[in-house]
Amino acid sequence: MWRSLRLVSALGLCASAFAQSSTVDSYTSTESPIAKAGVLANIGPSGAKSSGAYPGVVVASPSTTNPDYLYTWVRDSSLVFKMLIDQYTSGQDTTLRAHIDDFITAETNIQQVTNPSGTISTGGLGEPKFNVNETAFTGAWGRPQRDGPALRSTAMITYATWLIANNNESYVTDSLWPIIKLDLDYVMNNWNETTFDLWEEVDSSSFFTSAVQHRALRQGSALATAIGQSSVVSGYNTQANNILCFLQSYWNPSPGFMTANTGGGRSGRDANTVLTSIHVFDVEAGCDDVTFQPCSDVALSNLKVYVDSFREIYGINSGIRADQAVATGRYPEDVYQGGNPWYLASFAVAEQLYDALIVWSNEGSLTVTDASFPFFQQFDTSITPGTYSSSTPTYSTLTTAIKNFADGFVAMAAKYTPSGGGLAEQYTRSDGTPTSAMDLTWSYASALTAFNARAGKISASWGAAGLSVFPACSTSKAPTVPVVFNVNVTTVVGQNIYLTGSVGALTDWSTTNAILMSSADYPIWSTAVTLPANTQIQYKYIIVDNGGVTWESDPNNEFTTSVSGITTLNDVWR
Ligand code: NOJ
Ligand code: NOJ
């Protein structure tokens, strides 16, 4: 009886995974052209919704009230054009050349506009947004935002590199290089100054900003070398090395995530970090953790911690099992325009996982480390650290489950995409209705890059392979160990088991942020958490039923984590 029930439920899961995969197949094929048209409609002068934007100017969204997004942001525009430049240079769409050249003209003009952040030589390049006729926006705003020049130069360098390979070096040297150099010099000289983060709220240092600055300087130094502009190379390299060292300091070892900002007073769990991973992806760098590649153990651990932080806070996520995809947003504390799930955040999680699958398939193996163990344990409760070659059943089990998990995030966006395929900025936490800015250009671009990754397409490499921090860079962090919590509890429908306890990684005895456990092996509820090593920990399981909390009886469970290696706790509810 027990066996046959298990078999039925296993078959049920396979069947639903299969159904999901074909739903996502059909969503990607219908949504792709809609998203592409959505992007182009928001680019001046002839985009159908570009409302007066100058040639090559990207409107963030045609929405003019609540919120008014009829402006052009350097970040949004650069990310959008990086996607279009990748499509053009890879031959995916050979019709985009005029748009790209317009973009270069527009940004060349915008660079020169004196604005509240300064003139071109006194900090104006850090200005985040402009009017769509290329004049300064002079209202109050979170400025400067220093990711803009980095993202813009990365987009242009990608184009420049392709032009060089296609016999147009003189145009690069004479026309593109001077523009690119302005942005790179700004990054080189200012990366260590505080900045508003990509969400325009926190003024400190920010992981995404630092990471894209690092990438820009590496690419800039390679381009400068290629075209004989050797005078800038050592300055760019020196600061790239400094940023790479600084980047390591964002890592929070327990429970294992990149803290998004050095300021801000939040938990630090933020789509900032997942976006970083996809925007620094370089297939040649493998699963390198120094540059936070999508399949690195740190980026996978981070993905789980980020995703899990949304399980309890959105109504539309309730009832979803702990090992399944959920709707995710910018960060759990968000209140902007309702603080809802964002389409681009859902697509980013999927894209990171698709990128990881590409690399594992290239390399013919995947590696589970102590740091990535809690991520992988979601998909195979008996997994142990090690390297699994693509010929092993474990590799197949894991990659199949991870592909499914990734598809789950696209399916989430698909479920809340209205008929017609328009993508707004957000979908409500209560019932998934599209909300905030409609036709957000960045939402469309994020769908397209995720779809490409799902199809196995990769962007040009940028030189992430083989980088390491310089010897004097101190990266030591408190040691941690993975701990598996298993508890046997018989529950009724509607009840879920959570873990809470005495350290931050166990949510400091919170009942509202406690860790949802997976019922994949019901009646065993399971979760894995990265905890400080050699530390006394107290914990309890709780049953949550419609918001009502039932604690295990006293006393608290207590143990001391090991110095190294995985510990598995097999408990029975009391
Ligand atoms: C407007 C910004 O666009 C948004 O990112 C931010 O969350 C809100 N202001 C609130 O500060
Ligand atoms: C608000 C977002 O937080 C920010 O990242 C974006 O640049 C603007 N909206 C425009 O889309």
Image: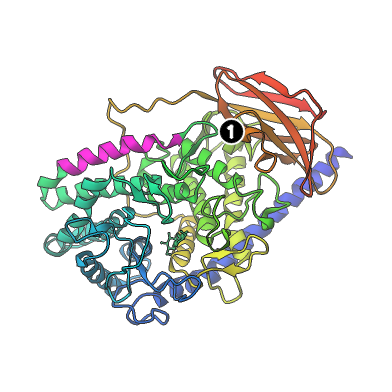
Query: In this image, 489 relative to 388: left or right?
Result: right
Q: Position of residue 438 (x, y in %)?
A: 51, 72
In the rendered image of this protein, does residue 192 appear above or below residue 509?
below
Task: Please provide the residue range marked out in magenta.
Answer: 234-251
Query: In this image, 531 relative to 283: left or right?
Result: right
- Residue 381 picture quarter: top right
Q: Position of residue 165 (x, y in %)?
A: 21, 58
> Does residue 178 appear anywhere in the picture?
yes
Residue at position x 51%, y 48% in the image: 353
Query: In this image, 553 relative to 61: left or right?
Result: right
CB at disc 1 and ligand 1 closer than 8 Å: no
> Does residue 281 appear anywhere in the picture?
no
In the rendered image of this protein, does residue 187 appear above or below residue 296?
below
Give the residue type that dot 1 points to: Ala
Pick the front one: 194 or 428: 194
Q: Residue furthest front?
A: 140
Residue tagged 1: 505
Q: Position of residue 329 (x, y in %)?
A: 55, 55
Main secondary-structure element of the magenta-colored stretch: helix
Pick the front one: 323 or 24: 323
Pick the front one: 35 or 392: 35
Q: Position of residue 61 (x, y in %)?
A: 44, 72
Quadrant containing the C terminus in the rendered view: top right
Name the image colouring: rainbow
Pick the front one: 447 or 123: 123
In the rendered image of this protein, does residue 454 appear above or below residue 58?
above
In the rendered image of this protein, does residue 211 appear above or below residue 32?
above
Residue at position x 62%, y 46% in the image: 401
Residue 244 lies within the magenta run? yes
Residue 304 lies within the magenta run? no
Residue at position x 84%, y 41% in the image: 491
